[in-house]
Each structure stands twice: as structure tokens, then as C-alpha cells.
Image (tube, grey):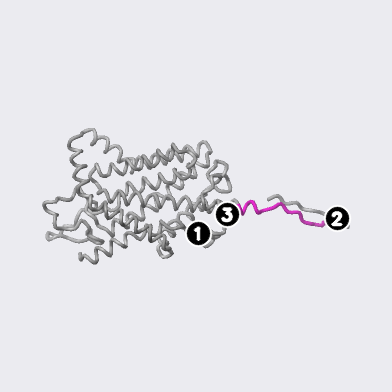
Amino acid sequence: MGKKLRYGIFWLMLLPFTALAQNDTLPKKLDSLNQLPPEVKRGNKDSIRREFYNQKTKITFPVYFTLLGDDIKQQVTAPFHAKPRDWFRTAAVVGLTAGVLLLDKPISRTAVRWRGESPTLVNTSKYVTRFGGPYEVYTLAALGTYGWLFKNEKIKTTTLLATQAYISSALIFEALKFLSGRQRPYNYNPEINSNKTLWHGPFYQFKKDANGNKPDNYSYTSFPSGHTTLAFAAATVFAMEYSDRPAIKILSYGAASVIGLSRITENKHWASDVLIGGILGHLIGRQVVNNYHRYAKLKSEQAAKKKNTLSFAPGYQFGRVLPGFVYTFN
């Protein structure tokens, strides 16, 4: 693959960060964010109190998919609405990533050496990394079940938002993996690959070698780290929904960070894969939470605007017209 094409693909892969770094947009069916009170934009603490999660703001089956579809639409189309400050943020991410890219191989070699010297690290890393995959799904299922059994709307809502962040994250990082075709560290031999790129670009998984064999697809899906993206997406949802509880915030981000590090010690990802996965997951989780709270705030305000009404309704009985009134409770 030519150098210009590889650079083009690299910049294309960074577009989601431009998208997610900016303020989200609301669906056309909802009011503009600018029409909401200033305290809503700043993330008013009242919007995360337990009383906020009620029948008016609950996520029903139709609402879940409406919000999910809008989340994905915002994440995909937001680059076309980027403002100058969003490009500055993206440039900062690019600069940070470029620095870490230079350290990828030394960090990977160090991680492999540590694994060889510490059986405890091997066993711990293998256990921890599963929390970025199936174990995290089980945890979300358990939390959702708890919220449903004990009628805790906040836990139910937070868990549903985490699943939305999971789904939209998976769609984005799978697309980036396909576009990058980056070789995983365990499949890289410096003696053989020293003069070859680690970035093979899209469609590489469909190419055949001289013997007619296709490459192992999993070995060329290193960028970004999916486990880290999912872990930070869910962690951000819980950290924002429970921002009034520092312990939950520390636990959420701490667990996600350890999961990300385990992907390096497992030799499944380069450090830059984990860095981008963490940033991507955080931005997606933030977007999902903000979008829900704008929706919920608007629903609450719409319900509050409904007032009780009194109307005149005359009736006719026994040949006479009788006055009547109807009082409607909303």
C-alpha cells in the first residue's frame, strides 16, 4: 500500500474523534440544545438525582431504539458539523497518539519480558482482560436484573445507557479495525517485518498470499482496542450517572484502565491501540449520556407544561338544558 494512501486512511480513522469531541446535536423531532436552560448544559446535579428517573423519563422499548439510532447518527454525521475548537481537540489527540506510536514497540517488548519473568502477571492479566469482554456483559446483566427486581429506575436506566454505549462503540471500532488492518503485536516478528508496515489498510483480510491463503483476520484487527473501547464506554456512563459519588467514578475508570493495560500485557494490542480505544470509549459514553439527559429533560418539561383544564359542557335532561362543567386532570 502506498505511503500517501496509508496516511489518508490514518486521517480518515481519526474523523470519529472530531465528531465526538464536539457538542452533540439533537434529533430533529426534539428541541435544540440551545433552547434548554444553561444549567442543563452544565450537567445540573438535579438531573442525576434518583427522583429524576421516573415514569416520565424512563427508557421504554421504543425510546431505547430511538435514542440508540440517534446516538449512532450523531456519532457518524458529527464530523460534518465540526467547529474549529473540535479540530484543535482532534489535533491534540493526533499529537498524543503520534508520540505513543513511537513507543509502541519498546512498550510491547517490555510487556513481553515482564510476562516471561512473572507467572503471577500472566495469570492476573488473563483474568482481568476478560472483564473487557464477557465478564462485563455479565456484570451489566446482573445490574439490570437488580434494577428490575427492586424497581430502581436509576440503575435500570444507567445499565440501558451502558448497553447503548456498547453497541455504538462496537460499530465504530469494528469499522476502524477494518480500515486500519493493523497487525497485532503477537503476530509481529521484528526480524521478518522490520521493513514492512504494521498498517495494511482495508480489504487486507480478503487478500491471498502466493499459496492462495487468506491472512488470519483476527491478527490484523489491532487498532483500536475493542476491549478498552467497551470498558471506557461503560465506565463513562456509570461515572457520569453517579458523578455525585466519587467512589463509583474512581472504580469505573480504574477498572477500565486496568483492562486497557491488560491488553498490552496480554500482547494483544499496542499501547496506541489502547490509548485510542480509551479516548473513543470515553467520548462515546459521554455522548450517549448527554443525549439521554437532553431527551429526558425535554420530556419532563413537556409533562410539566400540561395543566389541568376546566371546560363548560352543558347537558340536556327531561326536556331541560342543564349547565355542566368538565375538569380534566393532566
How far separated are the C-alphas under marks 3 and 1?
15 Å
Q: Quadrant of the N terminus?
A: bottom left
Q: Amino acid at mark 1?
A: Leu
Quickly name the residue at label 2. Answer: 322
User: What kind of element bears circle 2?
Assistant: strand
Q: Amino acid at mark 3?
A: Pro
Q: Amino acid at mark 2?
A: Leu
Task: Please tell me how many numbered marks the rendered image carries.
Answer: 3
Q: Which mark is residue 37?
A: 3
User: What kind of element bears circle 3?
Assistant: loop
Residue 22: horizontal and vertical position, in percent? 43, 58
* Residue sitting at x 28%, y 53%: 223
Answer few, some or many: residues within 10 Å of disc 1's Cα (few below 14, many 20 plus, some between 14 and 19): some
How far separated are the C-alphas under marks 2 and 1?
50 Å
Q: Is residue 303 magenta?
A: yes
Quickly name the residue at label 1. Answer: 26
Closest to the camera, between mark 3 and mark 1, is 3
Is residue 272 found left or right of 238 in the rendered image?
left
* Residue sitting at x 51%, y 42%: 154
